[in-house]
Amino acid sequence: MPSESIMRFVEALRRDGDLASIDAEVDPHLEVAAIIRRVYEQRAKAPLFNNVKGARNGLYRILGAPGGLSSDPKFPYRRLARQLALPGDATLGDVIDKMLSAKKSQPLPPVHVATGPCKENIILGNDVDLTKLPNPLLNRADGGDYIQTLGINIVQHPTQDWTNWSIARAMVTDKNKMVGLIMKPQHIARLFDAWKKSGSGRDIPYAIALGAPPIATMAASMPLPAGVSEAEYVGALCGSPLELVKCETNDMYVPANSEIVLEGTISISETAKEGPFGEMHGYSFLDENSQQPIYNVTAITHRNDAILPVCVPGRSSLGPDETHTMIGTLASAEMRQLLQDAGLPVTQVFTPYETQVIWAAVQVDRKRLAEMGTNAQELCNKIGSLVFRHKAGMQVHRLLVVGDDIDPFDFNDVTWAYATRCRPYLDEFHFEDVPAYPLVPYMSHGTGTKLTGGKVVANCLLPAEYKGQQEWVTCDFENGYPEEIKKKVLSRWADFGL
Ligand SMILES: Cc1cc2c3c(c1C)C(C)(C)C[C@H]1C[C@@H](C)[C@]4(C(=O)NC(=O)N=C4N2C[C@H](O)[C@H](O)[C@H](O)COP(=O)(O)O)N31
Ligand SMILES: [K+]
Ligand SMILES: [Mn+2]
């Protein structure tokens, strides 16, 4: 069973020797975030802060970098593996396969239970005071304390049977108010518009489940198709229904063993200034602030000694954080599914961390490619049209189409193919009429349009490969020498004292 709670996940990290349990007092105003940011960059143990300055009555402890790379270089993705009950040596390919494994299964709806750990403490109405919580300031340029970076935003469609789970940032603005980014084409924005169009004039009931079961948080970070209730997909993934409990002040349901639950309504009329926020591409633009919807908070419920998981987004080439290991990897899963469903000979898709998950390598099976009798122009336009016009491809601005001699998870491989086989101009296929990802710095702060275009498919296959021929020998130890020579070299390597 995947870690069905943050507590079980923390125990798994402790068993792996991948947890630093810190009892010394730490300051949520920048100090906690600075430690977490350095943990990503140094690939250090996941920090569990048990003594956050200003915490009281069990609100709250902080767990940093739950989806960062593990501190054991032999098992870099072990934290993601523990969240999905995969073996510790799982690869990113295993994570992608696991998250896609329920695509053909029947959705398995959650079950409603009377109570659960998240109901151990209930704070209602006037007793709700968010400003009394040790909310973390994550970056010196941030416009507020972002309490919501790894919780699940739970919102229902006003009329259809669709409850969406996603992650959307939110910062505290008042004792019972937050403001959060609700950005098209995300499902939360689509549902927000559906509520406004419904004409009911009512504000939108929501819940944010902080410290929900890790596999639920993974599904919340995954661009599953519109209309799919993530909770049902998670049930199918686990082979058993998730247990949900009803909110105190509205009809939303949340995972029973969430650490902390915020309940309330999202205003369909009132907004407030949101941001700046140190974002997933490694920038916090000082002018970045927009009017975003207000989240009213009518109740807080939580487990005793609750733990708030926190993500501190930033530069991923130094060490990826959850906006790369989860957003990038899970979008890669959906992009692979999309291309395979279209009958293309695509074997893997991955967004390299070295590119802030703005690029994606698309690996094709060259034997099957040759059977298609196609060419770069045709293939790249087909792939670009599919991916760039689909929500799963929203955050990707450059696709690199590579052969199956290239490992999409190995950036050395990907750049070697890109640098040597993609002729600038002739091998690049541009898309200016597709939705852009507004948070990409050269879109938000560049010279061109901000909401469309700036996307390209780079063909990294030589013409002969489209005919199934590899007209070269790769010059590296692996490929440049016969097996018996390689064996001989390896057997004498130590003797030579190399
Ligand atoms: C894992 C993760 C995913 C995030 C975010 C974060 C983390 C850690 C934090 C909060 C740290 C940073 C920002 C970054 C920002 C992108 C955003 C967000 O504020 N607004 C948004 O619209 N999408 C975000 N996502 C991606 C989103 O969850 C996925 O795209 C998911 O598929 C959406 O679910 P639906 O498909 O059902 O629509 N945040
Ligand atoms: K989702
Ligand atoms: Mn969704």
Image (tube, rainbow, N blue to C red):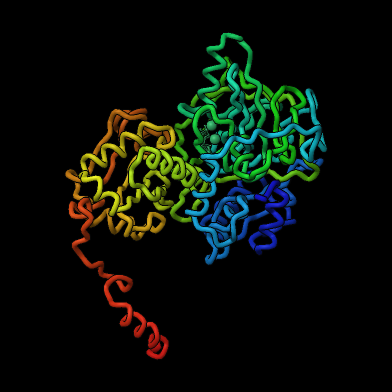
In which quadrant will I find the C terminus? Answer: bottom left
Residue 270, percent from left and from top: 58, 17
Residue 411, percent from left and from top: 37, 57
Please name whichever residue, 345 or 309, is drawn nearer the observer in this view of the structure. Answer: 345
Please name whichever residue, 121 or 8, is drawn nearer the observer in this view of the structure. Answer: 8
Residue 56 lies, with reference to residue 473, above or below; the image says above
Residue 39, percent from left and from top: 57, 56
Quadrant of the rendered structure where residue 113 is? top right
154 vs 302, left or right, is left
Mark yes or no: residue 145 visible: no
**How many discs appear?**
0
41 vs 498, left or right, is right
Residue at 46% in and 32% down: 288
Residue at 35% in and 85% down: 488
Mark yes or no: residue 492 visible: yes
- As drawn, the residue found furthest toward the bottom would be 495
Quadrant of the rendered structure where residue 395 is? top left
Residue at 43% in and 41% down: 337
